[in-house]
Each structure stands twice: as C-alpha cells, then as structure tokens.
Amino acid sequence: MSWLRDGLGIIEKSAEVEPMALSVSDTDGVFLVPAFAGLGAPHWDPQARGTIVGITQGTTAAHIARAALESIAFQVADLLDAMRGDLGASVSELRVDGGASVNNTLMQFQADMLQMAVTRPQVTETTALGAAYLAGLAVGVWPNRESLASQWSVDRTFEPTISSDEARQRRNSWNRAVARATEWAGAD
C-alpha cells in the first residue's frame, strides 16, 4: 500500500485502497507481484522484481489498487501452504491482526483464497496488546496466562464465498504472475 501511496501517488492514505478497489468488480485479469526487493518466503528469490501483468488499455488505477490488495492475500496463502507442508498438518482457521486486517475486502478475499475462515479480533493491534498483557502478568494485574484468554473476542469471521475451483484458478494465475517476476534482476 505504501507503494501505491508514495510511489504512484494514487492514494493519500492506506484507508483509501478499499473504496478504490471496490470501485471495480475485479482486477480484470491484472496481477501485481510486489517483489520490490526480491521475493521472500516461500519463493526465496532475491533477484525477483515487482511485476504487474495483465494490463490492457482498459486498466485503471482502481484495477491496480485491487491487484495490490489481492497480492497480500495471495502471499499469505503461499506462506500458509508452505507452513502446511512443513507441519504436515491442516489449518482450519486463520486469525488476523494489524492494520490491514480492518480492510473487509482484503479479509474476504483472504478467506476466499484460503478456502477457510478468517477471524478478526475486536482489538486488531494484537502485538501492542500482547505487550500490555505481559506487563500486566508481570505486575499481577492478571493471575496467569489462562486468565487472558477471556480478554480475546471476535469482531468478525469471514467465510469463503467462492468455490475451491475458482480459488484454485485464481491462485494458478497468481503463480504464473510470480513466475514472471522471478530471476529478473541480473537476467542479462
């Protein structure tokens, strides 16, 4: 989102991405791979570079904003697939937090791509809250870690709204876009 704001100047603040993305029904086949400094896990390609594929004469800033938003969910899905493979276990729910988790469009797309529930807590700044909980434990505000469990509550759970076939097709297109971004730097 910072690239849309600082690099392209098509938004002034991150909160503007959601309404812009919702102004179009989909990305119209545009995919943005934000490999601005290479690709990290699970691709591990320092030579990858940011790529936008699928642009046509009809592509607008809104399509690019939506593709940027969706790229977050695709990257999370890639990581979760790697984690599942490493653990040899399934995952039935993704719990989210942080600034991006307040974006309903992103959270719904995440649920669609993962084909699982995505649950957002009422307090989305969980890292800061966790630090406060640890401090409270240290000074006796809470008697034990178990007493903190009741402090966590759900704001909203997003369930998949598309078929697994459609999600697989979208993920396959994403993977094609990632393949075009890989090994770009120093490819001469």
Image (spheres, rainbow, N blue to C red):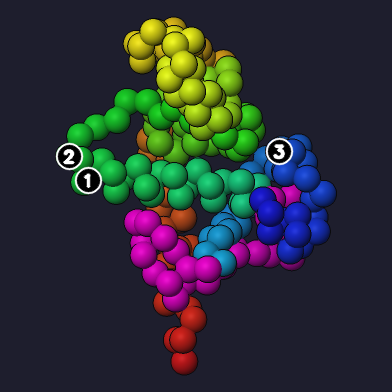
Q: Residue furthest bottom?
A: 188
The secondary structure making up most of the magenta span is loop
172 w.r.t. 126: above or below:
below
Q: Residue at x 44, y 39 (%)?
A: 113
Q: Residue at x 46, y 50 (%)?
A: 75
- Cβ atoms at labels 1 and 2 below 8 Å apart: yes
Residue 142 painted magenta: no
Of 133 and 7, the residue lying toward us: 133
Counting from the top left corner in percent of width and height, residue 101 is at 58, 32
Q: Secondary structure at mark 2?
A: loop
186 w.r.t. 129: above or below:
below
The magenta region covers 37-65
Counting from the top left corner in percent of width and height, residue 64 is at 68, 55
Of 146 and 85, the residue lying toward us: 146
What's the residue type where badge 1 is placed? Answer: Gly
Spatial distance from mark 3 to mark 2, Cα to Cα?
35 Å
Spatial distance from mark 1 to mark 2, Cα to Cα?
5 Å
**Residue annotated with mark 3:** 18
Counting from the top left corner in percent of width and height, residue 15 is at 74, 38
- Cβ atoms at labels 3 and 2 below 8 Å apart: no
7 w.r.t. 76: above or below:
below
Q: Residue furthest front?
A: 139
Residue 20 seen in this snapshot: no
**Residue annotated with mark 2:** 88
Mark 3 or 2, nearer chain start: 3
Q: Which mark is residue 85?
A: 1
Of 11 and 130, the residue lying toward us: 130
What's the residue type where badge 2 is placed? Answer: Gly
Q: Quadrant of residue 98?
A: top right
